[in-house]
Image: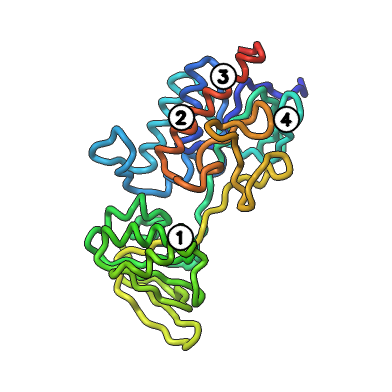
Amino acid sequence: MSTTPEHIHCLIIGSGPAGYTAAIYASRADLKPVLYTGMTPGGQLTETTEVDNFPGYPKGITGPELMEDLKAQAERFGTQVRFGLVTKADLNASPKRLWVDESTEITADTVIISTGASAKWIGLENETRLRMNAGGVSACAVCDGFFFRGQEVAIVGAGDTAAEEATYLSKLCKKVYMIVRRGEMRASKAMQHRVLNTPNIEVLWNSVTEDILGKDGVEGVVVKNTETNQSQTINVTGFFVAIGHKPNTDIFKGQLTMDELGYIEVVPGSTKTNIEGVFAVGDCADKHYRQAVTAAGSGCMGALDAERYLAAKGDH
């Protein structure tokens, strides 16, 4: 039995919109890509019900259906989609060496990283239940705010993203409660001014979320003031969590250049990392937009960059 690791021309790590779009382009360029899905095949969108903002679906589509469509399109052109998690990588080796599920070693000429980012959650039992059941708990106001037009909602967070999303929601919703843990925000002064000058945003300072109420959908939130120890129930139908995202990049630390949060840094206008032949696409390299369509666009860029890299080396 041979112990020589399988060699792959183009390895794609991760299976969200970025990974599958990279696979579509790479397979059409005859790079014979192999895509490992990670532990959540389809990525964050598989935990989303209605997707109304992805081009080409005028009536909307569910997240899982959209990812199945992208997967089928990638497979149609010859992508091998495999269930598995890349757990270790030596990207400085030539060819690159990687291990799947801590045991199977593979080598690759090019690697496209599309491991995404995971939203941070508060950790409440009802938060998880209502999030998984599409009951009105979301980590993306831009994605889901549309569904709460004219309603009252709450958002948790104190950074720029929370302030930006609260302002975004204020244009759609009747009232926005912003739950801030301390007596001040971390957001930039400009973003704070915008929040504080928006009439239908009410900031609940020194406050934490104790519980989310509702059987099939959010009906209210129990908020506790940490200075007075008093709890109150606010009647809302939507609950947004904006306490940050964590890019899924830990296995590449010490090899790829990253920012302080762990997002992979790429050469501006490209998907190139600091290591030749390694490209980063989607949310693992994008902390600004984090949309399915921008992830898909960067997946296309990653495949084109990989193809050009191989062509320049004479391998394609």
Query: For the point 63% across and 34% down, which residue is it?
Result: 273
Q: Quarter of the image containing the N terminus?
A: top right
The image quarter in which residue 163 lies: bottom left
Q: Amino acid at mark 2?
A: Thr
Of pointers 1 and 2, the one earlier in the residue sequence: 2
Look at discs 3 and 2 and give the one toward the viewer.
3
Q: Which residue is mark 3?
A: 307
Q: Which numbered tag is attached to residue 97?
A: 4
Q: Nearer the viewer, mark 4 or mark 3?
A: 3
Where's residue 28, x and y in %?
47, 17
Mark 3 or 2 closer to N-term? 2
User: Neighbour class for label 3 at 10 Å: few (<14), some, many (≥20)?
Assistant: many
Residue 176 visible: no
Mark 1, mark 4: which one is toward the viewer?
A: 1
Nearer to us in this view, 158 or 116: 158
Which residue does the numbered mark 1 point to in the structure image?
Answer: 242
Q: Are marks 1 and 4 in contact (CB under 8 Å)?
A: no
Q: Position of residue 149 (x, y in %)?
A: 24, 58
Q: How is the image coloured?
A: rainbow
Taking the image as shown, residue 149 lies to the left or right of residue 307, namely: left
Give the residue drawn at x 70%, y 45%. Answer: 253
Q: Residues within 10 Å of mark 1 (few under 14, many from 20)?
A: many
Q: Earlier in the sequence, mark 1 or mark 3?
A: 1
